[in-house]
Image (spheres, helix red, strand yellow):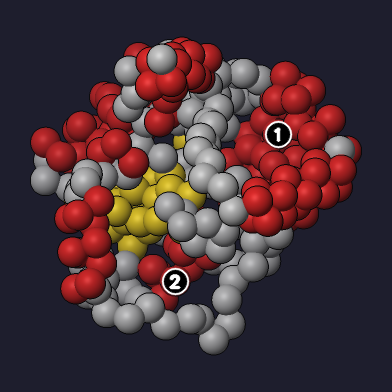
Amino acid sequence: MLNNNFENRTFLMLQGPQSLFFKDLAQELERKGAKVIKIQFCGGDVFLWNICGKKIKVATKTLFFRQKASLWPEFIAKVYKEYNVTDILLYSDWRPLHQNAILIAKDLDIDVWVYEEGYLRRGFSTLEKDGVNGRSSLPKNIEEVIKLGKELPKFEELEHPLANPVRNKVIFAIYHHVGNVLLYPIFYRYKTHRQHNIFRELFGIIPRYLTRKRRYLKSIKTLRFLSNERKKFFFYPLQLNSDSQVQLYSPYLRQEEAITYVISSFCKICR
């Protein structure tokens, strides 16, 4: 477990979320006596680490990976051994660079700690050892989950909960992508793990942002109708095609396939 004994431990941070979270975490780990190393992969990493937020002294060492992706396994293996790394911290375990780092870390008995957006949203972040989502060590069936939940201590609300408003997400995302553009000559070999580039994502996000109020009111109206009717209905949550849950852990390549399967199953029942 990630216990309170941080002395004589060296934490290597790979890519974190587009926020100051890893920077604040590094400061806290160092305060508790641990050594911290951060690897920067792109201009966005540099901007979030060195420019955004308070100028604090974090990380005993900052490294830069600017080589071809094919040389990453050799690079990370040397870092593990040269700095006697005991733990690695990363955000999302399915990114190609992270997957290679995890495999080598496990071979060297280095503890792997993976962060992900909270399973319970909003306002939560998830941390698991060795992997999250499809690689999570959590039970896979509802009966075991309920049983495990009953054994957990009672959750206590934070006295001062940490807010993460959408406004902050937008600002840090802008910083990240501006850094990628300005420092491209230095990190020109870097390739994002995202399926689409930022301009294509913005093309889809901006219209949704501009219509958010109208869609919110429509959702409230629909929920009230379903509640007042008191009839049974089926709720089918969707996911982005590019999400790792679809690409890695499902039998489908796209949501359209899953939707077709579900509709077909209803047709069979209604015959």
Residue where numbered disc 2 is placed: 28
Q: Amino acid at mark 2?
A: Glu
Percent from the top left, x then y, of residue 77?
A: 23, 33
Percent from the top left, x then y, of residue 159?
A: 54, 86
Residue depicted at 42% across the width and 82% down the height = 156
Front-lying residue, 93 or 261? 261
Disc 2 versus disc 1: distance between alpha carbons?
26 Å
Q: Element under label 1?
A: helix
Q: Could you tell me if residue 153 is visible in this image?
A: yes
Q: Amino acid at mark 1?
A: His
Percent from the top left, x then y, of residue 218?
A: 80, 44
Front-lying residue, 170 or 145? 145
Percent from the top left, x then y, of residue 185?
A: 66, 21
Give the total number of marks visible in the rendering: 2
Front-lying residue, 120 or 49? 120
- From the viewer's perspective, tell me whether residue 204 is left or right of residue 146: right
Residue depicted at 57% across the width and 76% down the height = 161
Q: As displayed, is residue 270 above or below residue 165?
A: above
- From the viewer's perspective, tell me whether residue 201 is left or right of residue 102: right
Classify mark 2: residues with Cα within 10 Å, few (<14), some (14-19) or many (20+).
few
Classify mark 1: residues with Cα within 10 Å, few (<14), some (14-19) or many (20+).
some
| Furthest residue toward front | 271
Quadrant containing the N terminus in the rendered view: bottom left
Mark positioned earlier in the residue sequence (2 or 1): 2
Residue depicted at 53% across the width and 31% down the height = 239
Quadrant containing the C terminus in the rendered view: top left
Residue where numbered disc 1 is placed: 177
Q: Could you tell me if residue 80 is visible in this image?
A: no
| Furthest residue toward bottom | 159
Q: Element under label 2?
A: helix
